[in-house]
Image (tube, helix red, strand yellow):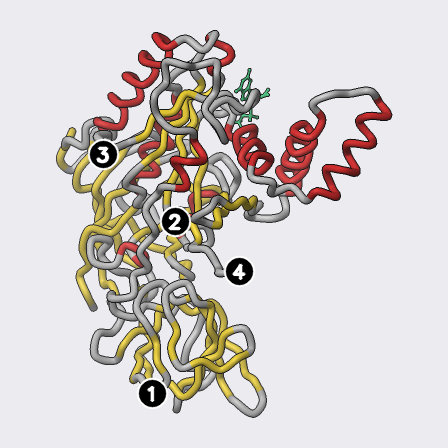
Amino acid sequence: TQEKPHQNLAIIGHVDHGKSTLVGRLMFETGSVPEHVIEQHREEAEEKGKGGFEFAYVMDNLAEERERGLTIDIAHQEFETDEYDFTIVDTPGHRDFVKNMITGASQADHAVLVVAADDGVAPQTQEHVFLARTLGIDELVVAVNKMDVVEYEETRFREVVAEVKDLLDQVRFATEDASFIPISAFEGDNVAELSDQMPWYDGRALLETLNDLPVPEPPTDAPLRLPIQDVYTISGIGTVPVGRIETGQMRAGDEVSFQPSDVGGEVKTIEMHHEEIDLAEPGDNVGFNVRGVGKDDIRRGDVCGPADDPPTVAETFQAQIVVMQHPSVITAGYTPVFHAHTAQVACTVESLDQKIDPSSGEVQEEDPDFIQAGDAAVVTVRPQKPLSIEPSEEIPELGSFAIRDMGQTVAAGRVLNVSEK
Ligand code: GDP
């Protein structure tokens, strides 16, 4: 069988609005739970005289995964439609969502926003929508869940849709073509098939909508950017940096440059899955070998790019950030650790330039004295060690970061412009 294009899907929304139930339902409806596992459970349930057990099984399993999520960063759940292989990426609220999303470990192509029909828009609905926007998602599929709880009423659905539209307009999401789908993840209404319970709904079921999402375009035409994850020494070959190509292509024979280490040379060989290849593209995890570059010349956090268009190294950069959680206030001089691609570098927030209203995007205050949780701001940042980072307008894949402090992600941001060294 032909391999299907891949989509990374984030499921976002307020706690208890039904995100995990929806993931379970999607996996169940697409037959992504192995038959023998369901069979085993069916027998057990029949012995105990319980009905509706197959779906319950998926839910138990997900709960277990979530427990394990304490030790495993990302719990990947997968399902397929006619067009795509979907991977559910870590959801916000899971410990390292923002960091994973920014460092590329779980960069989402699209997101489903889950809003419970009874509650409507809640605080985390707002926060996740703003975060999704900052992290570069341009379009959402909106699932109005728990329609069974509101007796499948069209008027309630319309009210919730109006609330969500207001919110999306505020952060400038495109709502013209957005899909709003009334569902019950629990009962399965309008997930795989249109439900008899909501004859007033004239749109498509959720799975069909996901199946019709546009194909993610790999950033092949951008200049090569390959953040280095590790550097190995392999006998017979020599120094082998490894990493995932974020943008552009790499060919054997290319002249490349590693920044900020500022060394380079000609690519001799490229390997993927233990096989030598001539051309590597976005998404490929590769190991390669560069003439004249030794193990101590480069390190994790370097970015490899073309010698004639090398990765940008920042003296300072200006960024838009969203403060998600911080016990007190952030003032000029604050020096937490910035996580960008594979780099982790202490950076000083040199100045707070503007405070932005997160719900309108308007400037609220010039040169504020401090910012705190819930605020958005434009800030100027000075890395304490050389850092390669790109304006997000030019290379979005290398233009966002998470700010970590005291063991948690305190803010997320994207780079507006860079002053080079
Ligand atoms: P999460 O925190 O967003 O992942 O929410 P969960 O999936 O854990 O769901 C929270 C609660 O809502 C659970 O008790 C679910 O059984 C329930 N729930 C989820 N979806 C539905 C639904 O469509 N209808 C009803 N009645 N309950 C639901």
Kind of residue indicated by mark 4: Thr
Kind of residue indicated by mark 1: Gly
Q: Residue at x 39, y 50 (%)?
A: 102
Q: Residue at x 34, y 32 (%)?
A: 129
Residue assigned mark 1? 253
Kind of residue indicated by mark 3: Ala
> What is the CA distance from the residue labelled 1 to the residue labelled 4?
34 Å
Q: Is residue 166 above or below residue 95?
A: above
Give residue 108's position: percent from left, percent from top.
40, 46
The answer to which of 306 and 406 lies nearer the viewer is 306
Mark 2 vs 3, N-terminal side:
3
Circle 3 — which element? loop
Quarter of image, res 25: top right
> What is the CA distance from the residue labelled 1 to the residue labelled 3?
43 Å
Circle 2 — which element? loop
Residue assigned mark 3? 174
Residue assigned mark 2? 336
Q: Residue at x 21, y 42 (%)?
A: 378
> What is the CA distance from the residue labelled 2 to the residue labelled 4?
48 Å
> What is the CA distance from the residue labelled 1 to the residue labelled 2?
40 Å
Mark 1 vs 3, N-terminal side:
3
Q: Residue furthest right?
A: 47
Mark 2 vs 4, N-terminal side:
4
User: In the rendering, which numbered label is found on residue 1?
Assistant: 4
**Mark 2 and 4 residues: CB-CB less than 8 Å, in contact?**
no
User: Is residue 171 something one can see in this rendering?
Assistant: no
The answer to which of 30 and 111 lies nearer the viewer is 30
